[in-house]
Image: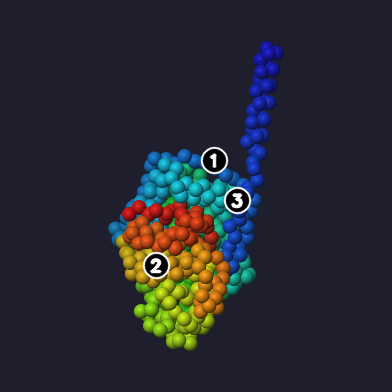
Amino acid sequence: MRALRNLVAFVAVISALVALSVAIRRPDTTPHLSAPAESAGPTPTTSQRRSRDPAPSIPANGPPIIDAANAASGFAHPGVLVSTGQLEFVRDRLRARAQPWTAAFDQMRGSSYASLDWSPRARAVVDCGYFSNPDNGCGDEWRDAVAAYTHSLLWYLTGRAQYARKAVEILNAWSATLQAHTNLNAPIQAGWAATHFARAAEIMRHTYPDWPPAEADRTAAMFRNVFLPLVGSGGAPGTWGNWDLIILDAAVGIAVFLDDRPLFAAAVDLWRARVPAYIYLSSDGPYPIGPPGGASGPGAMASFWFGQRTYVDGLTQETCRDLGHTAWGLEAMSQVAETAWIQGIDLYAEIQPRLVSALEFHSAFVAGDEVPGWLCGGALAERFEPLPEIALSHYRDRRGVDLPRTRQVVESGAPQSASNFYAWETLTHAGHPS
């Protein structure tokens, strides 16, 4: 009997030591993904960065697709930035441990946005001044939106329901709380948040059967009643190009989620008018095309293009502002084209001369070419971020168009991280299946 008691005590001690060793975790060394200058949101809390799911195996089959196509609208679902075919392609690449998808997946899963301890910080009014000053919920909102999209991708790629529940938790928190965006940055703030919220909601509504329809409908009401009044009209005349293009990206995503074909068509028409006013081609004439409803003429264009008076193919309206906002404009433009491509409209073909010229023009300087004196006073500011992964993959992998300088920049900088309105594009869009 004494021997049995000793054995039981020994087992108890060993179990306690094992439990203690599991509880002791390394500190999170994931670098903080800082916001660009227009929004300096708060850093994630300790609890948001603590929980790390063990490395998941990738199942052979993804979640079931619910209502793959809407007969009335004609939209394919899920179909905001990522499609079923793309997600299946990525999952297959991950099962094969292929690169760059595996490294990009590990980056996403190791980020703070993938934490199962993430706690949404929803509020009724998000008040954002210029450059997010004041920041009353601005960083909280778009970071929660990134987290919702991140968990929706993890749900699809791993099949683990805890990720689906977290994505739905974030969406439900905001749809039950948010009433308005206020102050000068309200439209662009709404654009930043809505892009990710729409992608997350689209994946969850069409792949996760345990999201109650009433909750999904409440998210739809949030898009229609809170976001669309700010992003549905496509910005304002004279605003900078990245602003308008991000807003239109949000409107296109919302339209697909809502199965709203008239909204989608109106947003695409606005995008078609805005793109030529953002990227110059010599066929436009001696000076750029003005934005819809905005100023025009050589003097007005020089001022609107940040003092630039020499125009060459591929130059953008924000090149002389800085490379960061230029990359934002090109990325938002590409995201709209990608969603449209999934929905059967080839906007990429319509803008190919402009977008390819812009990508190669800027990538050459990012890769190290000397900036000539006539261009922006001989200096280009800021970092070219995000990487143009989506556009490169479309033109190179789907269309066979070689963009050597763009490829150089993407390959040297990948995998793509996450920020205000973009996230994990190396994972989701590298090596598009034709």
Question: How is the protein colored in the picture?
Answer: rainbow
Please provide percent x and percent y for residue 288: 42, 81
**Residue 402 pos. (x, y %):** 37, 61
Q: Nearer the viewer, residue 346 or 70?
A: 346
Q: Amino acid at mark 3?
A: Thr
Quadrant hosting residue 80: bottom left
* Left or right of 280 in this view: 19: right
Compute the Cα span from label 3 to label 2.
34 Å
Q: For residue 30, which numbered disc appears in the image? A: 3
| Res. 16 visible in picture | yes
Q: Identify the residue at horizontal 61%, vertical 53% (top origin).
A: 31
Can you give x and y, in whole percent of width and height, for residue 331 in the image?
A: 46, 65
Residue that badge 1 annotates: 54
Tell me which residue sits at (37%, 59%) in the image. 396
Name which quarter of the figure residue 63 lies in: top left
- The local secondary structure at tag 1 comes to loop
Give SS at disc 2.
helix
Judged left or right of residue 369, residue 430 is: left
Q: Give the camera-side residue of 271 and 282.
A: 282
Q: Which mark is residue 38?
A: none
Tell whether label 2 touches label 3 (CB within 8 Å).
no
Picture quarter with the C terminus: bottom left
**Element type at mark 3:** loop
Q: Which mark is residue 356?
A: 2
Amino acid at pointer 1: Pro
